[in-house]
Image: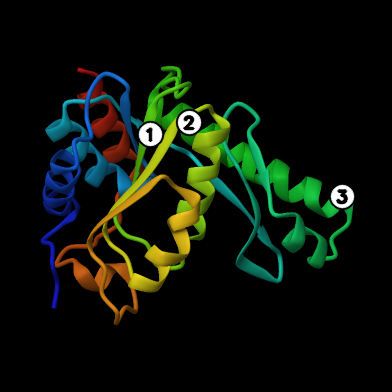
Amino acid sequence: MSLFHDRIDAGRPLADLLHAAGLGGDEVVVLGLPRGGVPVASEVARVLGVPLDVIIVRKLGAPSEPELAMGALGEDGVRVVNEGIMGSAALSGADIGAIVRREEAELVRRARRYREGRPRLNLQGRLAIIVDDGIATGSTARAACRVARAHGAARVVLAVPVAPKATVLALQDECDDLFSVASPESFSAVGEWYDDFSPTSDAEVVELLRNAQA
C-alpha cells in the first residue's frame, strides 16, 4: 500500500516533521539528491523557508559490484574513500583513475546543467538537510553525508519520506539526526510507497532550482 501520491506530496509530511523538530533559520540549507530527491527537497525548502540546492554525489563503484561503493566524489575536488573496500577491490592505480575521471566528468556535467552557472551554496558552518525520495541500501545517502561534512557543514541531517528500519539504524553514525516519515520493517523498493514514482528528468531538476532561486 502506497503512502504518498508523488514526490511533492511526500515532501509535505517530511517538511512538517522537520518543522516540528525546530529545523529552520538562516543557517539552514536544504540539499536535494538528484534526481528524485529534488522534488521532495523543493517542498521541504519551501515550507521551511530556507535555500535549496543540490548535493551532487557520484559513487565510485567497484567494477565487479557497482553497488559496492569504494568511495564517493563531491564538487570542488571533495573525495571520500573507503580504504577497506578500495583495497579489497584489487584494482590498479590506472583502473581507479579511469573510474574517478569518468565520475568526475558526470559530476561536472550535472552541476553545470542543474545550476545553470550558479555557484553551489556555501555549507561552511551551516546546517545541511540532505533530502532524498527514499533510502534503500543507504550507500548514496552515506556518501552525501560525508561530502557535506567535507564541504564544511557544521551539522548534517538526513531526511527522507521512507526508509527501512534497518537502514535507518545503520545510517545513524553518518549524520547528526535522521528523519523518516515512515520506517517500515518490510521493504523491497522505494517506489512501492508511491502511487507515481515516474523518473524525475534533468529538466525538472533545473526548473525546481530555478524556481527556488526566484
Q: Nearer the viewer, mark 3 or mark 1?
A: 1
**What residue is rendered at 34% in x and 71% in y?**
165
> Mark 3 or mark 2, which has the lower sequence index?
3
Marks 3 and 2, how far apart in space? Answer: 26 Å
Which label lies toward us, 2 or 1? Answer: 1
Taking depth in this image into account, of 74 and 148 the one nearest to the observer is 148
Q: Residue 30 at what x, y percent from top left?
A: 31, 34
Label 3 amino acid?
Answer: Ala
Mark 3 or 1 closer to N-term? 3
The local crowd at label 2, few if under 14, some if 14 to 19, many if 20 or more residues have their Cα within 10 Å, is some
- Residue for badge 2: 111
Q: Quadrant of the C terminus?
A: top left
Q: Amino acid at mark 1?
A: Ala
In-image side of 29 versus 55 (left or right)? left
Q: Secondary structure at mark 2?
A: helix
Where is residue 29 shown, x and y percent of the image? 32, 28
Q: Which residue is mark 3?
A: 94
- The one nearer the camera, 32 or 156, is 156
Residue 198's tag is none
Q: Which residue is mark 1?
A: 128
Q: Is 164 left or right of 123, judged from the image as shown?
A: left
**Residue 62: quarter of image:** bottom right
* Residue drawn at x 77%, y 48% as measured from the top left: 98
Q: Secondary structure at mark 3?
A: helix
Does residue 132 show up? no
